[in-house]
Each structure stands twice: as structure tokens, then as C-alpha cells.
Amino acid sequence: MIACIWISINAFAQDASTRASRDASDLLTELLLPQTSDNQWSAAEESFESLPPTVALPVLFREIAKGIPGGYSYAAYDCFSALHDRKVDGWGQFCVVNSLWCEQLACTQRHKEVSRVLLELWAKPISEYGQSVLLEGLCGDPTAKSKIAILFRDRAASVRLRTQAAICLLRQDEPMYHSEVVDFAEKVPISFTPPGLYPYPVQLKRVLFDELASPTRSKSSVDAAVVRLGFGLMLDEAEQAKRYGGKVSDYGPFLYAERLNAYLSTAFEPDRKQPVYAGSDGNERFWNDTAMNALFWWSSHKEEYRQRTAGLGR
């Protein structure tokens, strides 16, 4: 008798969950229709946002995992207001779904419940874009660290996903994963172009270097491998600029010099208040001088840092 009651309760709970999911799907359909009036849309949005994450997130994820519209490999339209953006041709549904998704993830009172749902969805990411969205949502969650580490070490996974996972691991537990991430960064191509009708190159190695050398990251020592990585990228940036011919800005190399300057606690940057850096050409001159100072320093120290495999971090 007790078992029968339990089965009935369980069946009722499953039925209620199915109805809730169906209601959420109906609400989302209404929200995605451009013909829905503004008043109806606002009411439906309020109803959807009141749904628990266990109901709302799986319904939203089926849409999220479809990826960016039109075969783009990046979000070419900047979503601002879901109520306004919903009628934008090609991008309306993407903006609405992402807005609702972000609202669910932003609620601090539901953090634990949201994490549980995202971890359940992790087993069926549907697409690479879907996996990336889940990774973003769980990036700082300690309960997801082991899954993120498995993804990072999965050589069959895309290099873009592995890079994203590496950054999450550094932010969660830098001492544990630092060496692994550095080894990975050394092998990552400087430029990676994801598939899509409108592809664009992603600077994965630069993303990893920026994270490894971030001023916000506490470090007990300087890692020579990170220094080599940074100067390698800086030299490549300068070489790429030469290929364009004519006058090319030194802002790209300057950004690497600036990050290395902070990481090494050196003085690559000259005094910005000097008169030579005033006027319309002042910025470009400052960028050039900073980059040149960094390269001069590297010419005197590169052999020392190339030989280091221990001490000072490596």
C-alpha cells in the first residue's frame, strides 16, 4: 500500500513537471513571436521569469544551443533590450532567449538550483555552442571544477572550448592548473578561425596569455614560460603589422608590452607627462616607445628566460 502511494505521488510529480515544462514552452513561443503585442509580451516575460530554474533553463537551453543566427561565428548584432530587439529580423529570437537565460543565471538566491540544472544539462550539451554556454554559466562554480578539467584535457574537444575551460580553471584554482594551462598555451595556434558563413579569427593564445599574466591574479613568482609566451606574441604582432606595409599603429605591440610590464614589475612605459607625448601624435609615440623599450629589454634577457625551466616559476 505504501509503495502504491509512493508511485502515485511520483507519477503526480512527473505529470506536474511535464505540465510545467509545457507551460514554459508555450510562454517561450509567445515571447518569440514578433506578432505578440508589447503588453502581452511583458506579461509573458514576467510569468516566464517567475518559473523555477528546473523548468525554465531546460526549455531555454534547447533554443540557446541552436547557436548564433545566420551561420555567424560571432554575435554581429548587439542585443540591448529584449522588448525592442525581439522584432529585429534574424536576431530577435536570439536576443530574447539570451536575455531570459541571463536573468535566470543572475539570480543569486537561485544559484545552487541553477548550478544543479546546468550540471544536469552538461551531459547533453546538444552543440559546441551549447557546451560553451554551459561552461560560461559554471565557470566559477567549484562543484563543476572536475567536469571543466575533463573538458580541458579532452584532446577531441575543440581548441576554443578547451581554451575557455582553461581560463575557468585558472580563475578557480590557479596554483593547481597553472603548469597545465601554460603547456597548453604554448601549443595553441596564435590565430584560430571557427567555422561559419562569416568566420573571423580568434586570438586564443593571446586570451590565455592575458589570463596567465593578469595583474588581478596573485603570483608568488614570475613564470619564465609566461614571459616567453608574451614576447613571442608581441613579436608576432609586430611582424604581422609589417606585412600590411605603410604606417601601422603600434597599439597592438603596446598592449603586450603593457601586460608584460605589469607582470615583470619593470618600467617599459616612459613618463606619459613628457611634452613629447602631447598633441595628436602623442598616443602613437607613447605606444611605440613602450613597445621599443620592452623589445630592448627582451633582447638583453631572452637567453636568460629561454634557459629557465626552474626558479622564478619554471
Image (cartoon, grey):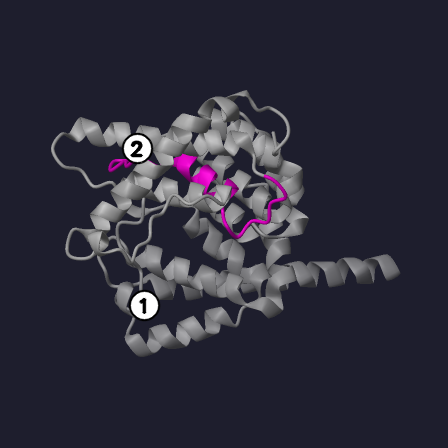
Q: Would you say residue 222 sits in the magenta stretch?
A: no
**Amino acid identity at mark 1:** Ser
Q: Is residue 208 above or below residue 39?
A: above
Q: Residue furthest right?
A: 1
Q: Which quarter of the figure has residue 51?
A: bottom right
Which x, y percent locates residue 259?
Answer: 42, 44
Q: Residue furthest front?
A: 275
Can you tell which of label 2 and label 1 is closer to the viewer? 2
**Amino acid identity at mark 2:** Glu
Identity of the residue drawn at 26% across and 41% down: 288
- Count of marks placed on residues: 2
Magenta stretch, overall SS: loop
Q: Would you say residue 205 sits in the magenta stretch?
A: yes
Q: Quadrant of the C terminus?
A: top right
Which x, y percent locates residue 124?
Answer: 55, 41
Identity of the residue drawn at 51% across and 34% down: 162
Residues shaded magenta: 192-221
Spatial distance from mark 2 to mark 1, Cα to Cα? Answer: 37 Å
Q: Is residue 245 above or below residue 167?
A: above
Which residue is under mark 2?
237
Q: Which quarter of the figure has residue 99?
A: bottom left
Which residue is under mark 1?
81
Where disc 2 sits, the SS reads: helix
Where disc 1 sits, the SS reads: loop
Which x, y percent locates residue 211?
Answer: 49, 43
Determine whether, in the image, residue 253 is placed left or right of residue 241: right
